[in-house]
Amino acid sequence: MEIIIRDGGVKDINGMLPLLEQLFAIEADFNFDPEVQARGLRMMLDGCGKHRAVKVACSKNKIIGMCTAQTRISTAQGKISAAVEDLVINPAYKRLGIGTRLLEAVEDWAKKRGVISLSLLADKDNHKGLAFYKAGNWRPTSLACWIKSI
């Protein structure tokens, strides 16, 4: 089975929405709303892509995985870092190395932009996801994520 990792585009939004629905089903803090998530994806895909990346994994022209990232300035490191979000693979295609390939594509994108580190948030109860990140040489920090709606 051939799996292609490529940049996502606006035409891919409908293929990415079911993946986000799957992801949000395991995240206690977020609810899936296709209009909201489609708007967010359109915002991610708007512009030149210098500060945002949307990578998709495709098999037979079907989107089977995705990963997004955005740059930010790290005052702690005095350089540009990037936050990885929305890494999700269709369950029928898990354990084929697709998640690793998507993260490698995001890392390559980041390196080309002078990004010195990647960070991500993972649901504390997603034990399979946490084990995947640990196996990929990601390390936890002592930081906790807090959020406030405005």
Image: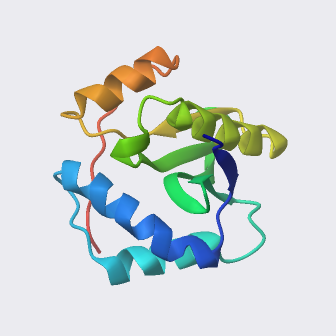
| Viewer-closest of 78 and 13 | 13
Please tell me whether residue 82 is drawn above or below residue 150 in the rendered image. above
Kindly tell me whether residue 115 is visible in this rendering.
Answer: yes
Q: Residue at x 54, y 61 (%)?
A: 62
Q: Residue at x 52, y 74 (%)?
A: 13
Question: Is 98 on the left-hand or right-hand side of 55?
Answer: left
Q: Find residue 50 and report its horizontal and vertical position in percent.
A: 77, 61
Q: Find residue 44 and report its horizontal and vertical position in percent.
A: 58, 69
Q: Residue at x 61, y 45 (%)?
A: 82
Question: Is 124 on the left-hand or right-hand side of 101?
Answer: left
Kindly tell me whether residue 140 is visible in this rendering.
Answer: no
Q: Find residue 73 and report its horizontal and vertical position in percent.
A: 64, 48
Please tell me whether residue 146 is drawn above or below residue 33 in the rendered image. above
Q: What is the total number of numbered labels drawn onto the structure image?
A: 0
Q: Residue at x 59, y 37 (%)?
A: 103
Q: Find residue 28 and report its horizontal and vertical position in percent.
A: 16, 51
Question: Which quadrant of the view contains residue 11?
Answer: bottom right
Query: How are the colours assigned in the image?
Result: rainbow
| Viewer-closest of 83 and 38 | 38
Please tell me whether residue 138 is drawn above or below residue 96 in the rendered image. above
Question: Is 133 on the left-hand or right-hand side of 73?
Answer: left
| Viewer-closest of 44 and 79 | 44
Q: Quadrant of the C terminus?
A: bottom left
Question: Is 91 on the left-hand or right-hand side of 138?
Answer: left
